[in-house]
Amino acid sequence: MKQNQIILFDLDGTLIDSTEAILESFDVAFGYFNVAMPSAEKITAEIGHPLDKMFLSLGISETEVWEYVSVYKAHYRQISREKTFLLPGAEMAVRRASEIARLGVVTTKTAKFSKPYLRDDLPQFKPGDTVRVYQKFKDSSSANAKEKTQAFEGIVIARKHGKGISATFTVRATIDKVAVEKIFPLHSPTITKIEVLQKGKVRRAKLYYLRNRTGKKAKIKKKETYPTTKPSTKKEAKKADVAKSVHAQD
């Protein structure tokens, strides 16, 4: 009998309460773009709808909505476990339900809606590479709120959340002897250009160990590249062998 019955649970509001984490993430998203956050009552009234629909209902335009969603998700993933609570009686309900049926969780998937917003105009890069990220922003100090572009150059120390709309990458730089890190939503329309200045030679996917290093120890070795075509003459082949041996000695 159990194999033929399935009970589906909707997590938020049924088993868990993540209202605190949701409100904080909305606050971060609106604050990131220097926009006043709507009241908590307005936001909580929208909980249960897809994030893009929530932001649209709260006054964000369609051209900017996925940018807000990316910032929201990047912060929510950092705090959700700490600020999400199991509702009273939820554990008992799940245990009893599991005795009579198979269990499942209902969640909203936005992949098919976000596909048109995925960018394919950015270069390939990975942790260890040195990049320069150009990002446009509105100057709130100006009366006309003019749009400006700012460049941030550093080493990519992490990429998270795959290649979808929630994908982010973290760039670490040292400015005036102070370490600064920025998390960028990969598909954000505010990113106008990414330049890969140098390919790095690393063995890890996350380079958080650089946070505990300074000076030369915080530098990444340059990844050497060689021509893939075969030398047409013996003389060219000899030159290529000499070049490889010199790099190997370095």
Image (spheres, grey):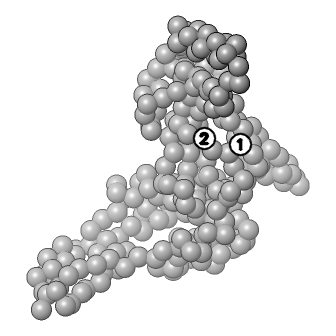
For residue 146, above or below residue 67: above
User: Who's the residue at 73% across and 68% down the image?
Assistant: 63
Left or right of 20, for residue 142: right
- Tally of numbered tags: 2
User: Who's the residue at 71% across and 72% down the image?
Assistant: 62
User: Who's the residue at 55% across and 50% down the image?
Assistant: 168
Q: Position of residue 91 (x, y in %)?
A: 18, 73
Foreground label between 1 and 2: 2
Name the amino acid, label 2. Answer: Phe
Closer-to-camera residue (38/132): 132
Q: CA distance from mark 1 to mark 2?
A: 9 Å
Q: Position of residue 119 (x, y in %)?
A: 67, 58
Res. 145 visible in picture: yes
Closer-to-camera residue (248/63): 248
Q: Residues within 10 Å of mark 2 (few under 14, many from 20)?
A: some
State which quarter of the image contains the C terminus.
Answer: top right
Quarter assignment of residue 10: bottom left
User: Who's the residue at 32% across and 77% down the image?
Assistant: 105
Q: Residue beneath label 1, please?
A: 194
**Contact between labelled residues 2 and 1, with CB atoms less than 8 Å apart:** yes
Q: Position of residue 173 (x, y in %)?
A: 61, 29
Q: Residue beneath label 2, please?
A: 125
Name the amino acid, label 1. Answer: Ile
Res. 28 visible in picture: no
Q: What secondary structure is found at the residue carrying circle 2? A: loop
For residue 74, above or below residue 100: above
